[in-house]
Image (cartoon, rainbow, N blue to C red):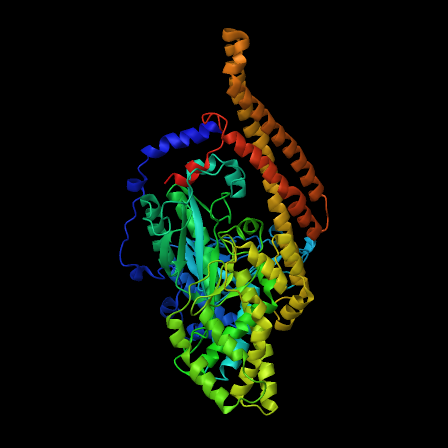
Amino acid sequence: MPTLRFNALKKLPFINYRKDNFVQTPCKLSELYCQNVFSEEKMREYLTKEAFQAVMNAIQKGVKIDRGIADQVAQGMKSWAMTMGVTHYTHWFQPLTGATAEKHDSFFTPIEGGNRAIERFNGINLIQQEPDASSFPNGGIRNTFEARGYTAWDPSSPAFIMGTTLCIPSIFISYTGETLDYKAPLLRALHAVDEVATEVCQFFDKNVTKVTATLGWEQEYFLVDSALYQSRPDLVITGKTLLGHAPAKGQQLDDHYFGSIPTRVMNFMKELEIECIKLGIPVSTRHNENAPNQFELAPMFEEVNVAVDHNSLLMDLMARIAHKHHFHILFNEKPFAGVNGSGKHNNWSLSTDKGENLLSPGKNPKKNLQFLTFFINTIKAVSEYSDLLRAGIASAGNDYRLGADEAPPAIISVFIGSQLYSVLEELEKVSEGKLTSDEKYGLKLNVVGKIPEILLDNTDRNRTSPFAFTGNKFEIRGVGASANCAETMTIMNSIMAHQLRIFKVEVDTLIENGLKKEEAIFNVLREYIKQSKNIMFEGDGYSQDWVEEAERRGLNNLRTTPEALERELDERFISMYEKLGIYTQREIEARNEIKLEKYSGIVGIEARVLADIARNHIIPSALKYQNRLIENVKGLKEIYGEKFRELAKEQLSLIESISENVHQIKLGVDELLSAKEKARNISNHQRQAEEYCQKVKPIFTKIREASDSLEMMVDDELWPMTKYRELLFTK
């Protein structure tokens, strides 16, 4: 291991990455946009009028495409793909493994009876494939003898080309019909929120016929040199460092966020942007993040389904391009202890087919009442289903990040800014039932009518809040960098659909009982404000004071994944999903089981890797250095006799300290392996995850502290692991 480390460090300064990896933008990025996408423009060119209209109806109205039309679409798609040099096709889908999946098939088809072949691709190939579902987590849904799965084309997300392969975005379902991926439930949630949000919009504008959920994600990541990455077995196997002393200088002093981007990194970013643009991913922002060698990329917002696909595609693309620039990309939420972790902020909103953002204040009282309706209903939904949102961002990696004074706490709260908070306080004073003329005048003139003016001087974004309003959208800040956005978006759009449905019924009931529409809306919103006040918080979410205050308010602080996932099976949540048709109870329980298994699996792997490194790398290196010290002490004794004790005082102290730390590591490893084995033998998935969390993970700290102490004692030339200062500051 030391050999790998020092060879990498020796070669790095003499490799001219700036020259060898220089990237020249070939033309204006706008000219490259959607070059590798079967876009609406391409469809107009390659499809019959009938086929084009069928696909557009499927995208806009959810109309099913029949088999005959599918054959026409397949022929047009194949013709376009082959002009781009494509040889294979695949259904591209997002199973619950956390990565995208592909199974490539060739267009090439031999013709019987002769030495001839053709390129063939028809409707059945487009619409459906049958990958081996036994390769994916089943969560108890599929029996071994029924381990079949089907992928089905999703027309609402355009096909694209990666290399020489035509990728067809698809859903993934089991032999028995249950969903096995992230996309299918998301599409159901988007349909549900569209349906009810459109009905609510018609309180204000009868011409609205469709509401679309939008998402703008922000992808944070670390880049480390490929050679240094290979020298760290913990990084290679787990995606994070399990050992390592914090460097003397972290993110203090330098302005990392606004600092200039290193040239080698810039070349990576330029090539990444070019490939993103070709694939229709509208990336617009690139910059350093707070930590050394940490960066961020963000696109313009898009329709949620497309945005989710683009983020999943981007993560694959980033890894491929990073390798070309001799980088390895880290999406783990906390790859370095004591250094800022990586998140994936999800900026969510709703917009109408008339181009209105429903979470953006309008220019008149009517539009502002519409804004307040969706704004307050969002807060109410989060208030009622905060534990479900917390469960949606739970993962082994995110447990280290949440609440670490760099990311939002595990307590779900909503930040709206002091000025909007004062608007809600005014609305809360509305009298029950019919409004007086003074109330109507006051609300329209002094509250609702002034919202645009107020927001011109909007309060600062609270970066300690997990759910913050930022002027025209809500920013869900707790999502982990490695997560699939679909999970959070499915939850967010589901709870919003459920809440708007309740709101619509309550308003309609009040109207039927004699209240005017505006009065009914004000009355319902007033109650929602009262019921949601506990979750609204403007202060420092990182402070211990907030932890205590949140407890007084009755807000849950679910610090770990097992705690969060246990709450996911609350009967209220299951009932909501079933009413909306998002999940069946069987699907919910299966997904919960999969997430628990994944958590236990990750912690178990980290335990084994830590034990191996500690025994095979750290202890031998420490003993080797200790032997040097012992030889030194022996030499001093031979020369100076009994006087050596005074002369070798520091060496003797080091020898004792090394022995103490080696002892702690040895005891820790034995304890760790014993605890891991005990946890592994627990059959109940919830109990097993709790055992890994409560009994296995705490031992990591004991081993790490002893190892990190040794790192500061042992000769640098003997230390086997590439150090933080090298991983984080090698550009």
Left/right of residue 711 with respect to residue 432 in the rendered view: left
44 and 682: which is toward the camera = 682
- Residue appearing at x 53%, y 23% in the figure: 654
- Residue appearing at x 32%, y 40% in the figure: 17
266 and 550: which is toward the camera = 550
Q: Position of residue 301 (x, y in %)?
A: 42, 65
Query: Which of the 4 image quarters holds residue 275?
Result: bottom left
Tag count: 0
- Residue appearing at x 31%, y 48% in the figure: 260
Relative height, residue 693 to residue 125 (above, below): above
Q: Tell me the quadrant of the picture where the C terminus can be found.
A: top left
Q: Position of residue 729 (x, y in %)?
A: 39, 39
- Residue appearing at x 47%, y 80% in the figure: 370
Relative height, residue 631 to residue 402 (above, below): above
Query: Which of the 4 image quarters holds residue 391?
Result: bottom right
170 and 348: which is toward the camera = 348
Q: Look at the image and tell me whether residue 58 can be seen.
A: no
Relative height, residue 617 to residue 535 (above, below): above
324 and 436: which is toward the camera = 436
Q: Position of residue 121 (x, y in %)?
A: 47, 61
Left/right of residue 345 with respect to residue 678 in the rendered view: left
Q: Look at the image and tell me whether residue 554 can be seen.
A: yes
Q: Position of residue 558 (x, y in %)?
A: 62, 56
